Amino acid sequence: MTQLETIQEHHRLCDEIHQCVLDENRFLRTQQRPTDAALLERKRTLLQKLDHTLAALRAVPAASARDPEVRAQLEKTRSRILQILQLDQENEQLLLRCSLATRAPNSGPATPGASVSMLQKIYARCV
């Protein structure tokens, strides 16, 4: 697989992740409750794929970023990642609101859902 193909594959996965995060956002806004298990499983599957594409990206030499076509694809991918991060942050806020709204009045401190945000998982893989 060429360097450009590796980056394009990663970008396609970022598009899938973006769609998943959009779906989660719509669900949280309309249903005003935490997402179902199917969406959480979808996120887990995408995160596993993300591990593979990140490993492939790490193998791409940094010098390849000088190529204008590669550089343009990288910029598109960065832009998509920023959109994902922004939506994920909004989803975490919506999830927290849902959790607070559904907890009983005297049940003690609220705890956010067991879902770890996609942002946290992406960050953990990049560090």
Image (tube, rainbow, N blue to C red):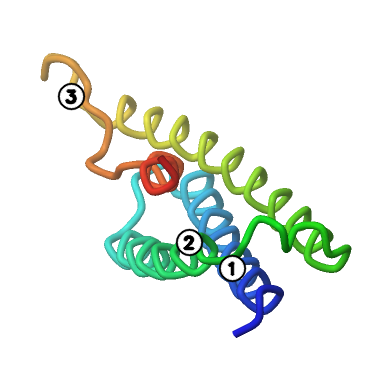
Instruction: Name the outermost residue toward the left.
Output: 107
Q: Amino acid at mark 1?
A: His
**In front: label 3 or label 2:** 2
Q: Amino acid at mark 3?
A: Ala
The residue closer to the viewer here, 30 or 62, is 62
Q: Residue at x 22, y 41 (%)?
A: 114
Left or right: 81, with 32 as reference point:
right
Residues at circles 1 and 2 in contact by the CB criterion of under 8 Å: yes
Quadrant in which the N terminus is drawn: bottom right
**Which of marks 3 and 1 precedes in the sequence?**
1
Q: Amino acid at mark 2?
A: Leu
The numbered mark at residue 104 is 3
The numbered mark at residue 10 is 1
The residue closer to the viewer here, 11 or 108, is 11
Q: Is residue 118 above or below residue 98?
A: below
Image x and y of residue 22, in percent: 58, 55
Image x and y of residue 10, in percent: 59, 68
Q: Is residue 64 above or below residue 32?
A: below
